[in-house]
Image (tube, rainbow, N blue to C red):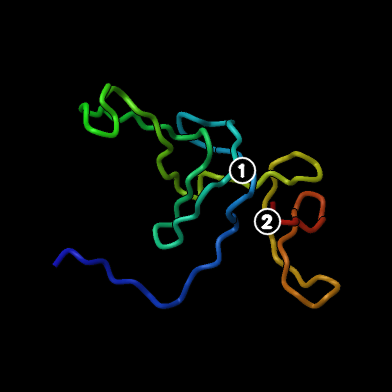
Amino acid sequence: MGMKATTSKTTKLHIRKGDTVKVLTGADRGKTGKVQEVLRDEQKAIVEGVNMKHKHQKPNAQNPEGGITQSEAPIHISNLMVVDPASGEASRIGRKVNDQGKLQRYSKKNGQFITNG
């Protein structure tokens, strides 16, 4: 009926949970924040302090005052670029084999490997 076909193959994304990213487009352009969650199926990520949404809530048992709450909404990963922890600059990401023979992400700007977190 309204179900989306999903493939069993999981796509590799250039961002991971814990990465610091820079927003490239949209209302929050230029802001940086830490990735809290990656929604792989939707190719979106939730970034701390970016793409804030407002929700009007009626008073209830948990929140007797009611009011307006703010939370982060997902943003598409194509609008995000990883900030290299070593240089502090946003850089494109590639993958290459490190000394231990394992694939690891690296910054295309300076060629250094990126350690997660």
Is the residue marked by circle 2 packed among few (<14), some (14-19), or many (20+) residues within 10 Å? many
Secondary structure of the residue carrying tag 2 is: strand
Name the outermost residue toward the left: 1
Specify the farthest residue to the right. 99
x%, y% of residue 59? 22, 26
* Residue closer to the observer: 61 or 47: 61
**Which mark's residue is nearer the viewer, 2 or 1?**
1
Residue drawn where x is 46% and y is 61% of the image: 40
Q: In the orientation shown, which residue stands out farthest toward the front?
A: 61
Q: Amino acid at mark 2?
A: Ile
**Residue at 44% across, 44% down:** 75
Snapshot quadrant of residue 83: top right
Q: Quadrant of residue 93?
A: bottom right
Residue bearing the label numbered 1: 21
Q: Report the residue marked by disc 2.
A: 93
Tell me the CA gap for discs 2 and 1.
12 Å
In the depicted structure, whether residue 22 falls above or below residue 99: above
State the quadrant of the N terminus: bottom left
Q: Secondary structure at mark 1?
A: strand
Q: Quadrant of residue 21?
A: top right
**Which residue: 70% across, 56% down?**
116
Instruction: Name the residue: 35% across, 28% down.
Output: 69
In the rendered view, would you say 68 is above or below 40? above
